[in-house]
Amino acid sequence: STDCEDLTDWTAAAAGTSPTIVKTLFSRGVGSLKCYSTGGAQSQMYWTLPATQTEYYTQCRFYIPYNTAAQLHEIIGHYSAAPARIVNLEVTDAMLLQARNSVAAATYSSGVTVGQGCWHTVQLYTKVHATTGAVKCWFDDVLVINQSSLNTGSNAIARIYGGLVTGTGTR
């Protein structure tokens, strides 16, 4: 994994609007990013890796406020350079944590209900390979998803995305 302590490396992206990223560095290696846009448009942020990777581990802390029913939250995602989603962690409108393998069009449930109004830590591990790919997820330091022998494609991981919220609860 890569320590991304320089929050200026993150870029905002949104459909049809100019999103804003609020960046706060609390201490070395620990920062806070919040991405939002006006008018209800989807917004998210991304960081481009210094070099593409076929295996990557990402850790982040996230907070989902109260009253966010009927929304889908993409917490963190591993994307190719295209950019195309490879694997991401998301919280469904029912507040369930799951991993989505976009290459194989599959989802993997964690069985975890995410509490609102409190901080959580997730880790996402992705191995890119057409037949021996893997996806692992830890929620608050407990392994909750452990999938192997997957098709996660052949495009290396080039970007880390986070912060996408949709208003419909579906993709």
Image (cartoon, rainbow, N blue to C red):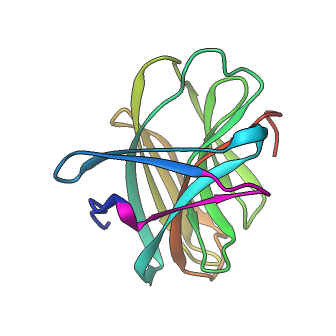
What's the magenta region?
8-19
Q: Which residue is drawn at 64% across and 66% down?
A: 86
- 11 is within the stretch colored magenta: yes
Q: Residue at x 40, y 57 (%)?
A: 58
Q: Is residue 141 above or below residue 4?
A: above
Residue farthest along the left direction in this orientation: 28
Q: In this view, does 158 lie above or below 166?
A: below
Q: Which residue is drawn at 26% across and 59% down?
A: 5
Left or right: residue 48 versus residue 29 is right
Residue sitting nearer the eye, 168 or 58 = 168
Left or right: residue 40 versus residue 132 is right
Q: Quadrant of the N terminus?
A: bottom left
Q: Which residue is drawn at 66% across and 76% down?
A: 153
Residue 129, image quadrant:
bottom right
Residue sitting nearer the eye, 25 or 86 = 25
Q: In this view, does 77 lie above or below 85?
A: above
Pinpoint residue 147: horizontal percent, then vertical percent. Answer: 55, 54
Residue sitting nearer the eye, 54 or 15 = 15
Residue sitting nearer the eye, 32 or 147 = 32
- 144 is within the stretch colored magenta: no
Pinpoint residue 109: horizontal percent, then vertical percent. Answer: 64, 38
Left or right: residue 141 versus residue 11 is left
Pinpoint residue 159: horizontal percent, then vertical percent. Answer: 52, 70
Residue 95, image quadrant:
top right
Pinpoint residue 8: horizontal percent, then vertical percent. Answer: 37, 63
Left or right: residue 68 versus residue 8 is right
Looking at the image, how many numbered discs can be counted on the residues?
0
